[in-house]
Amino acid sequence: MCLAIPGKVVSIEGTEGVVDFGGVKQKVRVDLIQELQVGDYVIVHTGFAIEKLEEEDALETLRLWEELAQYM
Amino acid sequence: MVETEKMVKAITMLADGLPHVKFMHVCGTHEQSIVQYGLRSLLPENVEIIAGPGCPVCITPKYDIDTAVFLAKHGVTVTTFGDMYRVPSTESLSDAKSRGADIKIVYSISNSVDIAKKNPHKEVVHFGIGFETTAPTTAVVVKDAPENFSILCCHRLIPPALLFLLGLGEIDIQGFIEPGHVSTIIGVTPYRIVSEKYKVPQVVAGFEAHDLLMGILMLLKQLREGRCEVENEYTRVVKEEGNVVAQKMMDKAFEVVDADWRALPRIPASGYEISKRYEGCSARKKFEDVLEEFVYDSREPKGCKCGEVLRGLVYPDECPLFKKVCTPMNPVGPCMVSREGSCSIKYRYG
């Protein structure tokens, strides 16, 4: 039920946008995201974008993994 | 990319010498990933992962399903997420529809609002279930919903449930793997009280096999170092403060109430009801008169152990009905219906 999938924003008009999920394009509500731009990646839950995916945040995951690599 | 084999080796190394540790997750999507990727079979014997009350469909009270069915039988169009459709109750939504009630499955609450706009002479009630991940979508639509649209609000909150579970004292948990998408909305802070009060480490984790293994690794590392903190593995999505826009909208749209969870006692401050400001959108308020005639039968199916499964006390295959009487084709309890219910996942993946 809490499933949310990532996609790329291809257009925005008011509170709605079109998100491309690897070829499948769908209309989603974007009211919950501030400063959204075409080209941004978002994760979408039941037709609503609930968060923006930022490159630097993704890098933080990688940094965390590298830090723990000392145990591997 | 760190290889799975290396992660498993590190987990084994960190777990070596520790007593038996039990980590609980509270997310159906986590259970799905854990079973699908066979992660339990990769873990050392002394590391156990159990599922808690993480499937919102499974914990939605029978009372609320019966209320939705009652409204549908009294001339209201009820919209529901597909997961909820076949959940057993006195009469499931699916059974009620087969007997003529106007019940429609929607992918999003937006679809439900569209149905209301296209049918201005019909009352439309959306069965609003789900945890903090889904609640903001309800909060968005109440702002400018059409007059003939309302919500049977059954949203539930995860942190109060964690506190309540530990407070019951039935189960000994050494760590929580926290749900990635609930945390996307609420952030990391609301979990702190759980670590402070019960001295358990927690890690917010994503849904890939590597995310979950890393979450387990981080929990073990905290245990090794004697720490009880809330850490975030899913930083590519979850921000420390969560989605602040969503939180502000939820603060306006809802008030926090004591709430029932199916198979659990009432949990203090664990649910959302539509706030006074948007009272016109509350189906309970709008149909107060109609609901006065609603008679509730609280009996649950005999022998069903969904309650114990949801509290992490037994695994699905310890239920006497599992795979014998209770199957996805003929579900007895809610955990066999939802694709994220522990029993349904166990049935499908073994």
Image: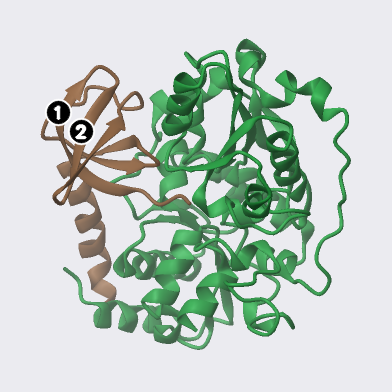
Chain colours: A brown, B green
Residue that badge 1 annotates: A11
Q: Is residue B32 visible?
A: yes
Q: Is residue B134 left or right of residue B298?
A: left
The quadrant holding residue A47 is top left
The quadrant holding residue B244 is top left
Q: Is residue B249 visible?
A: no
Q: Residues within 10 Å of mark 1 (few under 14, many from 20)?
A: some
Type of amino acid under label 2 = Val
Q: Is residue B227 left or right of residue B281?
A: left
Q: Is residue B128 left or right of residue B5?
A: right
Which residue is painted at 40% across and 52% down in the image? A3
Task: Give the label on residue A18, or none.
Answer: 2
Q: Chain of mark 1?
A: A
Report, in whole angstroms, how far the alpha carbon at label 2 lies from the one at label 1: 5 Å
The quadrant holding residue B30 is bottom left
> Which residue is at the front of the view, A56 or B31?
B31
Which residue is painted at 13% across and 49% down in the image? A23
Q: Regarding mark 2 in the picture, which secondary structure is present there? A: strand
Q: Is residue B307 above or below residue B192?
A: below
Which residue is painted at 31% across and 84% down in the image? B9
* Labels 2 & 1 near each other (Cβ < 8 A): yes
> Which residue is at the front of the view, B297 or B61?
B297
